[in-house]
Image (cartoon, helix red, strand yellow):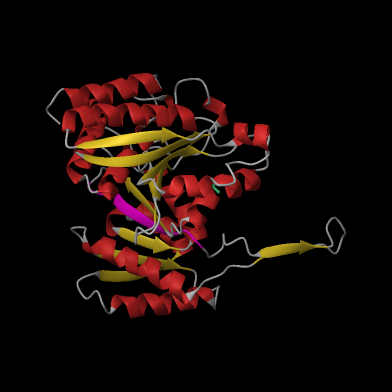
Amino acid sequence: MRTYKIAAIGADGIGPEVIAAGLQVLEVLQQRESGFKLEVEQFPWGSDYYHRHGVMMAEDGLDKLKGCDAIYFGAVGDKSIPDHITLWGLRLRICQGFDQYANVRPARILPGITSPLRDRTGDDLDWIIVRENSEGEYSGNGGRVHRGLPEEVATETSVFTRTGVTRIIRYAFELARKRPRKHLTVVTKSNAQRHGMVMWDEIAAEVGQGFPDITVDKELVDAMTTRMVLKPGSIDVVVATNLHADILSDLAVALAGSIGIGPTANLNPERRFPSMFEPIHGSAFDITGKGIANPLGTFWTGAMMLEHLGEADAAARLMHAIERVTAAGTCFTPDLGGTGTTKGVTEAVCDALRSGNV
Ligand code: IPM
Ligand code: MG
């Protein structure tokens, strides 16, 4: 029996609700699949923990997580604590501490889902956005002086390292190689940002020489937004900086039907540290506790986690079960225009898995 240790961190808002649903689905999948087992340990970190202990996670939290095979993460953010504290205290602490430099975000119109793009389906919109996740605009490099005075100055300086840019671009090329279309779009803003972004373009050209089987094109980030809307079928894998891909990936999941569906993997591709898997949506205070959060993003995230663990068959089966449920169209949560509940969608996916024909 192949056994994997999973650290589950529901954290804030709807995070605990969707992670509970995700673990339920993974449990049913294991019973169905046999051959592997997930040993799940729950960690109570997040904003409630902060209110009790003054920190978002235990001081030795990274040591506690180090031995696990993957982290299944809900969402972080709470109205009562500034966002930069919750984010840097938990999610970014894990991403940076474990050098999870590749943030991978697939977006596809699943069967039965209506895209806001008229008449588009999964044949037209099937992308993976690769976001640099360790430096760039979100490196935390900057400062403030003369606080509160009229001459106050704040700097937020992007950091692009040759090592960081090379490894994310290489990762994106390798990912494109595994896809049928073998196409990569390198997004920058090298007309206006003439240092870091020009280095990105140069490094992309250098790394690309090692991938003659991949077709590559370049796009400026502003033009990329229009291309995503007007020519979705021209896109396959996209690589971009931390900030640019943060924005493009939100647009991508919205175009794919709902932010409630999108998954994310925060990967340390060399596997020196555990990787972390989380739905793309945030804590969503407006619907917290109402039982209507869409768990599909967390299920798809679970499939990405299984794939990373080497359980490709189980991952594919879970995706089939998700698609079975979306295609039926009978069980959509409000973000997809339905009246379904987290529980209802979870049961539908579990039933599809139990039925034996996915
Ligand atoms: C995301 C989120 C976060 C990010 C927020 C919460 C800062 O938007 O995962 O895309 O940009 O890293
Ligand atoms: Mg974002």
Q: Nearer the viewer, residue 157 or 193?
A: 157
307 relative position to 81: left or right? left
Residue 315 magenta:
no
Q: Quadrant of residue 117?
A: top left
Tell me what residue is drawn at x 64 percent, y 41 percent: 55
Residue 354 placement (x, y as % from top left) = 18, 23
Q: Nearer the viewer, residue 330 or 239?
A: 239
Identify whether 244 is placed above or below 217.
above
- Residue 235 in view of the camera: no
Give the residues drawn in magenta, as a range: 123-134
Residue 8 placement (x, y as % from top left) = 42, 36
Q: Quadrant of residue 146?
A: bottom right
Residue 128 magenta:
yes
121 relative position to 161: left or right? left
Tell me what residue is drawn at x 38 percent, y 42 percent: 262
73 relative position to 317: left or right? right
Residue 157 placement (x, y as % from top left) = 63, 68
Tell me what residue is drawn at x 34 percent, y 41 percent: 5
- Residue 91 in view of the camera: yes
Q: Quadrant of residue 12?
A: top right
